[in-house]
Structure formats: structure tokens, C-alpha cells
Image (spheres, rainbow, N blue to C red):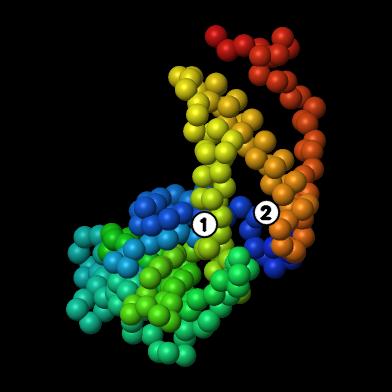
Amino acid sequence: MALDQIERARERGIPEGVVLADAGYGNDAKFREQLTEWKLPYVAGIQSTVTVWRPGEEPKPAPAGKGLGRPPKLLQRDPEHRPVAVKELALSLPAGVWKNISWRQGVGEKLASRFAALRVRPAHRDYWRAEPHAEEWLLIEWPGNESEPTKYWLSTLPANLAVSELIHRAKHRWIIERDYEELKQELGLGHFEGRGWRGFHHHATLCIVSYGFLVAERTRFPPQPRAGTLELRSPEIPARFRPRGSSRTRRAA
């Protein structure tokens, strides 16, 4: 992210580090819960079968105890009080919820689609919990030329975040994939043939540094005008830092 973008994000209360993941990871509730435990906000793709509670709803609290044994603590469900798949929820939304929003400039025109963003509670196995899952964003994309929604995301970004910012983060994963593809194909990240972790670490570091330099140079002379340029600043080296292998570094046994 460019430095001017980081400053604007700070002003709006948007975290600098956001984990972006596709549905292969986002479908895994344990993965999402671990990110939350580490206090890492995420925007994760999910499949249409993932279940959530409708906005404003949550599991029923545990019933009152009868005075014998331990009082029940687990959350409850019943046929009239149940979560729904995100696809079912999307199809039930009124037309006024859907908004046409653009997230960035494409090659010939701005990229735009139709989205709905709701605050919901994930429902994954909450019947084994004493407290419901915290509210998250559910972002749904339903292009106007499609018969049903095409993409879904769950996100723990702040509740007061503008929907346009949420969409921008969700769609940023495509840019990361493009960067990774260029790293592998153009700069040789995928050409490492060694067997050691240290060798791969050095190889990957050099590839990433080279790519960072090329991206910075590319923003100086873009084919089309863009807002802002990428500035690279040299970080301060910690006073007690010693390069690995230095004679002043104590070697592990």
C-alpha cells in the first residue's frame, strides 16, 4: 500500500494489516477464529453454503436451570429459530439493499458491480458455545447480469467502515495474486531448487526486494495517470541488530 493510502486509512480508522483470503481458507471457521484471536482483521471469501444468523438475530440463550445439577450453558436452536445459508439470505434481501459500487479504475473503464453489506453473526457450531459469535460484515456481490449472487465474504473490519472501503479490501486479493504470479514467473520466485529453508529465505527475500523496486519504478512512469506514487523508505536498523552469520552473533548449539 502506498504511504499516502496508509495515512488516509489511519485517518478513517482502517487497520494497516488486513488478512485477505479466498474461500479455500475462509470456509474454515477455525482459521477465521484464530485470526480473530491474534487480533488480525480479515476479509475472507466464503462459499454460498456457509450459515449465518440474519441481521439482528442470534442463537437462543441457554434455558433456565431446574435446580438440579449444573445449569445449562449452551446456546439453543429450534425449527423456528435457526440460521440460514448466506445464499438463502442474499436471495431474500429486498431490492433496495443492493447498490452499484465501483472499486477501482480498470483498463478501459471503472470496475463496478452490485453489492449488499450486512452485519451478521456466523453460526458455525455455535450450539457448542455459551456465547454467540461476534458480529461481522457479510459482503455479497450479485452482478446485474447474473441470475444469483456470485461471491460472498466475511470480514472483521470495523462496523463503521464505509461499504466502498470494504469492497476495495475484498477485491484487493486479485492484485496480490497478480503480484505473486509476477514474482514467480518474471522474477524467479518459483525457480528455487535448493533444499534448505535458509537458502529459500534468501532467494525469496531477494525476489521480493527486486519486485518492490520494479513496482516503485513502474509507478513513476505509469501508462495511465494514477493517484499517488509508491515511496520506499529505508527502515531504521535496530541498535542491537546483527546479520545472521556475523562474527558477533552467538551461534546456536
Amino acid type of the residue that numbered disc 1 sits on in the rendered structure: Trp
Task: Judge the density around disc 1: few (<14), some (14-19), many (≥20) Cα neighbours within 10 Å.
Answer: few
Separation (CA) of disc 2 from disc 1 = 14 Å
**Residue on which disc 1 sits:** 174
Does residue 85 appear to the left or right of 100 in the view shown? left
Mark 2 or mark 1, which has the lower sequence index? 2
Which of the 4 image quarters holds residue 65? bottom left
Residue positioned 33% across, 80% down in the render: 147
Asked whether 47 or 80 is in front, the reply is 47
Quarter of the picture holding the C terminus? top right
Label disc, if present, on residue 232 of the rendered structure = none
Q: Are marks 2 and 1 in contact (CB under 8 Å)?
A: no
Tell me: residue 30, above or below residue 128.
above
Residue positioned 64% across, 30% down in the render: 206
Asked whether 37 or 243 is in front, the reply is 243
Tell me: residue 96, above or below residue 168.
below
Asked whether 154 or 176 is in front, the reply is 176
Does residue 180 appear to the left or right of 210 in the view shown? left
- Residue 45 shows in this picture: yes
Amino acid type of the residue that numbered disc 2 sits on in the rendered structure: Met
**Residue on which disc 2 sits:** 1
Local SS, label 2: loop
Residue 243, position as x, y percentages in the image: 70, 20
Residue 72, position as x, y percentages in the image: 26, 64
Residue positioned 30% across, 72% down in the render: 85
Local SS, label 1: helix
Quarter of the picture holding the N terminus? bottom right
Residue 148, position as x, y percentages in the image: 34, 77
